[in-house]
Image: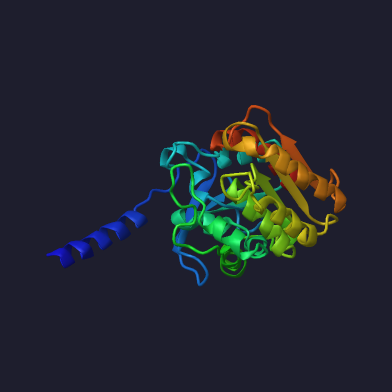
Amino acid sequence: MRKLFTILSIFISIGLLHAQPLPKVQKGTIERIEKLSSKFVDARNVDVWLPEGYSAKKKYAVLYMHDGQMLFDSTTTWNKKSWDVDKTVSRLIEEGKLQDFIVVGVWNGDKSRHADYFPQKPFESLDAAQKEAVLNSARNNAVSIFGNYKIQSDGYLKFLVQELKPLIDKKYATKKDAAHTFIAGSSMGGLISMYAICEYPTIFGGAACLSTHWPGIFITNNNPIPDAFVAYMKNHLPNPKNHKIYFDYGDKTLDAMYPPLQKKVDELMTEKGFTDKSWMTKFFPGQDHSENSWKDRFEIPLQFLLGK
């Protein structure tokens, strides 16, 4: 009886995974790649947003975005907030401010999210004691950040570059070159976007990193991670002549940790030759660490990276 109950529970869980509704959008259409499997990370949904009038006879730039389940419809998200990406993008395209592009919303792996998004090579540069402290770190509620997952962002990026991008380029009418391929996210999604353009500068021509979670964990005192990120970027930032990077931050809730850390990054960007043509950092006093804040200012990185 117990075995039967377990089997039934498994099938119910699988059914629930596949029963998740498509987000509703006001403009354009959503197509879902259901539970896309990977050699590198756990399977996950991918929601592809196509603008009004999408045509296979045209070619479109591509914006890859992390935390894909949070992008379009607040009625389907865990916190009832979303970026409302379709509304912002459609408005700006209609106003003639953006080139034509599609959005590929890559769902996070839930329990593997922190392990997927934490830049791996900076972590590997830490000494053994520092690594152990990072892996054992927890949130304020004592819940482990990484769970039972090892940091696997190199694998996550291989999933994006080696598996997902070829699939998107085959299925949709895309411009495949780096000049028309962009990546974006917030918080840990901001970190992995920075890491992606550093690791794959021939794939991604621009990155938008909103409320970038430079602490990596949830403390700043005696935390070696921000300096490890800066040291990594010093040796791996892409060429500012043909890449664009956007950063921003607020000063409320979790964003209150970021101002002094972003300042160090900004100093490095100047040192590495980035100018206002290739780099932007914006500070938003009073804004917090939430989809509502990112929604309010998303048009700025969109126009910086994908403007006409």
Residue 288, percent across and down?
A: 59, 33
Can residue 307 be seen from the camera position used here? no
In the image, what residue occupies the spot 60% across and 68% down? 158
Residue 1, percent across and down?
A: 12, 65
**In the image, 16: left or right of 209?**
left
Determine whether 261 is above or below 57 in the image. above
**In the image, 41: left or right of 129?**
left
> Extreme left residue here?
1
In the image, what residue occupies the spot 57% across and 67% down? 155
Can residue 226 be seen from the camera position used here? yes
The answer to which of 284 and 215 lies nearer the viewer is 215
In the image, what residue occupies the spot 60% across and 50% down? 216
Residue 64, percent across and down?
A: 61, 54
The answer to which of 234 and 95 lies nearer the viewer is 234
Which quadrant holds residue 289? top right
In the image, what residue occupies the spot 55% across and 50% down? 49
Q: Quadrant of the C terminus?
A: top right
**In the image, 282: left or right of 274?**
left
Residue 60, percent across and down?
A: 66, 55
